[in-house]
Image (cartoon, rainbow, N blue to C red):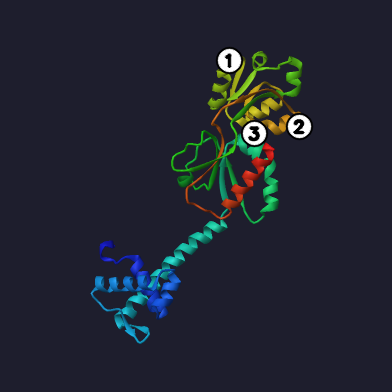
Amino acid sequence: MDWSRIPSLSSLRAFEAAARRGSFTQAAAELNVTQAAITQSVRGLERDLSEVLITRKGRGIDVTPKGRLLAESLREGFGQIAEGVEAIRAENEARPLRLSATPGFATHWLMPRLGDFWTRHPDIELSITPSTEVVDLRRDGFDMAIRYGSGHWPGTDAELLTDGDFWVVARADLVKDSKAECLEDAGRLPWLIEGQMQEGRELVEREGLDLDTVDLRLLTTNTLVLSAVNAGLGVSVQAKTLVEDDVRRGQLALICALNHKNYGYYIVTIPGREARGLRTLTRWLRDQARETAE
């Protein structure tokens, strides 16, 4: 298709509306522009095609035979475009929202709260994919991701959901038996860390504990780490968000708190994309984070 030979879509749309409505005024109202803009677009189209398409008839207009032929073609073409767009929208409205989150966040923060979302919004289906990979939202078809980091991911909108505080924790009876009350004391105990969790490891070492000198086991996922910690197998450094409920219940004991400024869990979305239910999910996540902070 040689687009250089096709007039502007705005002028074609203005002409089709005027021909269908039989009025420049009604066409202007339909397209939410001025009557002068419709008239100017139609006259520009006529100059482009070197053909009279619409003539004045009293206070109204009359469409010429060639104008009627063009209007019919445009109506069919715009109709097919509308059908294609609506088909995609209908498919998007029918599919579930797709959310990517780290396994630790999904298991320990999101899932315990998700029943509230289902109760409040039973019409919104949510598909959650736990993954340690940083997904490409556009390429991989995700509507939202919950990522841990500094909030700087090119080509995305990122909104801080929870802070970047870390807690050093262990099962309550393990801490009680060892009398670990500070980070230095915890160095006598076995440690458990996810192999890819560089932020937490760097923060602990910045506070003065060299993890190369302790009994350290690296596990493949943070879900496994948290399971091992809850089983009493060692100490771990975790994002506060993931363990504060367990600490509040007394299942885990807080040894010390560490702060990683500018880091936290972020709501990450594609700029300008508004999948059905996305705003509702975003508001619900904000409310849950606010209630937790209070």
Q: Circle 3 sits in a helix, a strand or a loop, which is it?
A: helix
Which residue lies under the disc numbered 1?
Answer: 208
Percent x, y for residue 224? Answer: 63, 29
Percent x, y for residue 148? Answer: 55, 34
Q: Is residue 14 left or right of residue 138?
A: left
Rendered image quadrant of residue 237? top right
Instruction: Tell me whether circle 2 and circle 3 mark residues in contact (CB < 8 Å).
Output: no
User: Closer to the observer: label 1 or label 2?
Assistant: 1
Q: Circle 2 sits in a helix, a strand or a loop, which is it?
A: helix
Q: Residues within 10 Å of mark 2 (few under 14, many from 20)?
A: few
At 60% from the left and 18% from the top, the residue drawn is: 216
* Type of amino acid at the residue the image marks with label 2: Arg
Q: Circle 1 sits in a helix, a strand or a loop, which is it?
A: loop
Q: Earlier in the sequence, mark 1 or mark 2?
A: 1
Assign the C terminus to one quadrant of the image: top right
Q: Earlier in the sequence, mark 2 or mark 3?
A: 3
At 63% from the left and 32% from the top, the residue drawn is: 223
